[in-house]
């Protein structure tokens, strides 16, 4: 079950990387003071990535917990 723990940690890190990417993308757009329409486009592009990254993080954490419980 050690493999499940490490695989879950890797999946969580990929998800965390995606979340950090989303945060920096929106943060750069806010600092650039883009217009409302441009900000809306940025948010529309970031939203699916954000949702997917959050999903990966949760799945990875579930894998870690399962690996620990099944040990």
Image (cartoon, rainbow, N blue to C red):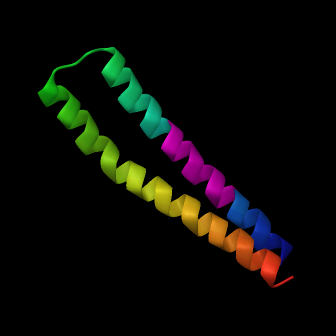
Assign the magenta stretch its main secondary structure. helix
Quarter of the image holding residue 43? Answer: top left
Specify the segment rendered in magenta: 10-20
The residue at the far top in this view is: 32
The residue at the far left in this view is: 37
Q: Is residue 38 left or right of residue 33?
A: left
The residue at the far bottom in this view is: 70
The percent coordinates of residue 36 (x first, y second) are 15, 26
Location of the C terminus (image quadrant):
bottom right
Residue occupying image coordinates x 78% and y 68%: 5
Q: Is residue 69 left or right of residue 44?
A: right
Residue occupying image coordinates x 69% and y 57%: 10
Location of the N terminus (image quadrant):
bottom right
Residue 29 falls inside the magenta stretch: no
Residue 17 falls inside the magenta stretch: yes
Q: Is residue 69 left or right of residue 10?
A: right
From the viewer's side, name the closer residue of 21 and 35.
Answer: 35
Asked if 71 appears above or below 36 in the picture, the reply is below
The percent coordinates of residue 63 (x first, y second) are 68, 72
Asked if 48 appears above or below 56 in the picture, the reply is above
The percent coordinates of residue 38 (x first, y second) are 17, 27
Residue occupying image coordinates x 72% and y 79%: 66
The percent coordinates of residue 59 (x first, y second) are 57, 68
Quarter of the image holding residue 64? Answer: bottom right
Asked if 11 appears above or below 34 in the picture, the reply is below
Residue occupying image coordinates x 81% and y 71%: 3
């Amino acid at each position: 079950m050690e493999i499940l723990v490490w695989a879950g940690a890797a999946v969580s890190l990929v998800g965390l990387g995606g979340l950090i990417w989303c945060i920096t993308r929106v943060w750069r757009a806010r600092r650039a003071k883009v217009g409302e329409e441009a900000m809306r486009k940025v948010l529309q592009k970031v939203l699916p990535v954000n949702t997917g990254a959050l999903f990966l993080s949760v799945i990875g954490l579930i894998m870690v917990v399962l690996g620990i419980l099944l040990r």
